[in-house]
């Protein structure tokens, strides 16, 4: 007897309790990724760098945002500045290193045009004999920058959207107010550990994964031991408005549930022994626990590749004392590896005919469709590249 392969289910055929995901090509198509670069990453506030990484004047870091390389530096007067990392002369990339420090100025490696740390053109070979080259006009192109939670957020849009509405608004939506996150005083915390993950998956798979906990019982045994309610599959930031409570007998947010560190100054009693997760579109995940904060920044590099920088932040006295933070770091490092492995397993299947019409979202994942709706709106022609969009 021969069997005929059944055709893939189309979204229209889904029963009412199920919702369709985006079709597979959204995760594999180069043109879609290019549109996301233009209409999402180049129009929204993008969390680029931890402010304290650029401690001294002259320290710089370059980051890929959409199709642009953005250079962030600390000026002589101590402020952070952001510029397009492009020399105004003939367009050479100004800083070719990912990070570093210059003594006074930024000098182009091509013909040696030289800019000060405020972006002004201050020297060039034969500049005095070229009166038409105005030093300000031919300065570096500035990019909008805001500091919040100890990070520099930059926006490539000519008219950046409201930071309060789009960035702070995401935390208000999850926590009820902005004070609840500012109480962790993230800007005063010290970096205990940074791990950079090079994930061979589309950025949206990583966002979707972070937004749901339907997978928690299957792939996160250590996390569900610490947060037993996660085993039910309901994501903390959507269904557990109060934050997910530590299990009975769990002493701290560590890989084996043993004691962590003292509660951070300033957090409220009702924030103790709880985990909060916040997604700030398009590329930030914030995780709050009583004794540390974990910040994920995603850098979408290609339709099938995303670099994720994850910072573990502690009270400065914990780091200064040389305390062993390994059990604390290990918990979310395992979660990251488990999540990113799952995303990498999913990525190749996105181009399969089985996923041509997408997959399904079960009820505990329905909120992910809001992300899909938001994205497809951003990519629609009415919400064009000049649009500052919504959150
Ligand atoms: Fe930079 Fe010529 S391209 S100095
Ligand atoms: Fe997960």
Image (spheres, rainbow, N blue to C red):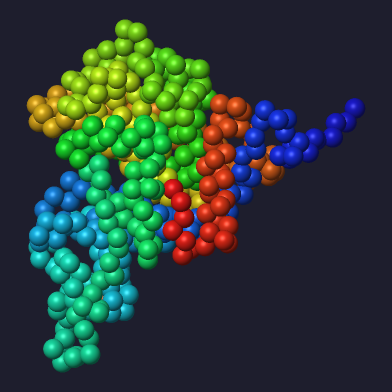
Up-down: is 223 above or below 41?
above
Instruction: Tell me where residue 12 sits by quadrant.
Output: top right
For image coordinates 50% across by 55% down, the residue present is 36
Q: Nearer the viewer, residue 13 or 356?
A: 13
Q: Where is residue 331 in the image (x, y as percent from the top left)?
A: 33, 24
For image coordinates 50% across by 30% down, the residue present is 212
Q: Is residue 205 left or right of residue 151?
A: right
Instruction: Tell me where residue 199 sits by quadrant.
Output: top left
Q: Where is residue 62 in the image (x, y as percent from the top left)?
A: 28, 57
Q: In this view, does 357 lie to the left or right of 247?
A: right
Residue 149 visible in the snapshot: yes
Which residue is farthest front?
177
Residue 307 visible in the snapshot: no
Q: Where is residue 176 in the image (x, y as percent from the top left)?
A: 37, 32
Q: Position of residue 276 (x, y in %)?
A: 36, 27
Up-down: is 370 above or below 92?
above
Instruction: Name the quadrant of the N terminus.
Output: top right
Q: Nearer the viewer, residue 195 or 187?
A: 187
Q: Nearer the viewer, residue 179 or 370?
A: 179
For image coordinates 36% across by 17% down, the residue present is 245
| Number of callouts | 0
Q: Nearer the viewer, residue 263 or 62?
A: 263
For image coordinates 44% across by 23% down, the residue present is 240
Which residue is farthest top?
249
Q: In this view, does 4 lie to the left or right of 185?
A: right
Up-down: is 229 above or below 364?
above
Q: Is residue 366 left or right of residue 260?
A: right
């Amino acid at each position: 007897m021969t069997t005929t392969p059944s055709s893939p289910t189309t979204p229209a055929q889904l029963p009412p309790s199920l919702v369709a995901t985006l079709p597979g090509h959204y995760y594999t198509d180069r043109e879609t990724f290019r549109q996301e670069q233009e209409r999402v990453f180049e129009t929204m506030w993008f969390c680029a760098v931890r402010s304290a990484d650029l401690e001294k004047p002259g320290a710089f870091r370059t980051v890929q945002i959409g199709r642009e390389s953005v250079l962030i530096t600390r000026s002589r007067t101590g402020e952070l500045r952001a510029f397009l990392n492009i020399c105004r002369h003939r367009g050479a990339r100004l800083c070719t290193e990912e990070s570093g420090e210059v003594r006074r100025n930024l000098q182009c490696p091509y013909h040696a045009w030289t800019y000060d740390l405020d972006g002004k053109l201050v020297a060039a070979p034969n500049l005095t004999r070229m009166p038409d080259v105005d030093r300000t006009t031919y300065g570096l192109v500035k990019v909008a920058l805001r500091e919040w939670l100890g990070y520099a957020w930059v926006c490539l849009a000519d008219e950046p959207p409201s930071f309060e509405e789009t960035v702070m608004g995401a935390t208000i939506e999850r926590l009820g107010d902005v004070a609840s996150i500012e109480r962790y005083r993230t800007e005063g915390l010290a970096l205990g550990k940074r791990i950079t993950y090079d994930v061979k998956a589309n950025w949206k798979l990583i966002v979707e994964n972070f937004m749901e906990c339907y997978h928690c019982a299957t792939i996160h045994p250590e996390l569900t031991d610490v947060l037993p309610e996660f085993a039910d599959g309901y994501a903390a930031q959507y269904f557990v408005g109060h934050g997910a409570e530590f299990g009975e007998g769990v002493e701290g947010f560590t890989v084996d549930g043993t004691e962590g560190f003292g509660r951070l100054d300033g957090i409220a009693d009702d924030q103790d022994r709880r985990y909060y997760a916040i997604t700030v579109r398009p590329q930030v995940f914030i995780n709050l626990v009583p004794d540390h904060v974990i910040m994920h920044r995603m850098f979408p590099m290609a339709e099938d590749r995303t670099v994720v920088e994850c910072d573990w932040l502690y009270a400065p006295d914990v780091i200064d004392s040389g305390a062993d933070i390994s059990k604390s770091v290990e918990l979310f490092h395992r979660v990251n590896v488990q999540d990113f492995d799952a995303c990498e397993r999913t990525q190749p299947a996105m181009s399969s005919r089985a996923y041509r019409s997408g997959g399904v979202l079960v009820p505990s994942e329905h909120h992910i469709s809001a992300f899909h709706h938001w994205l497809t709106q951003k990519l629609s022609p009415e919400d064009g590249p000049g649009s500052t969009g919504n959150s």
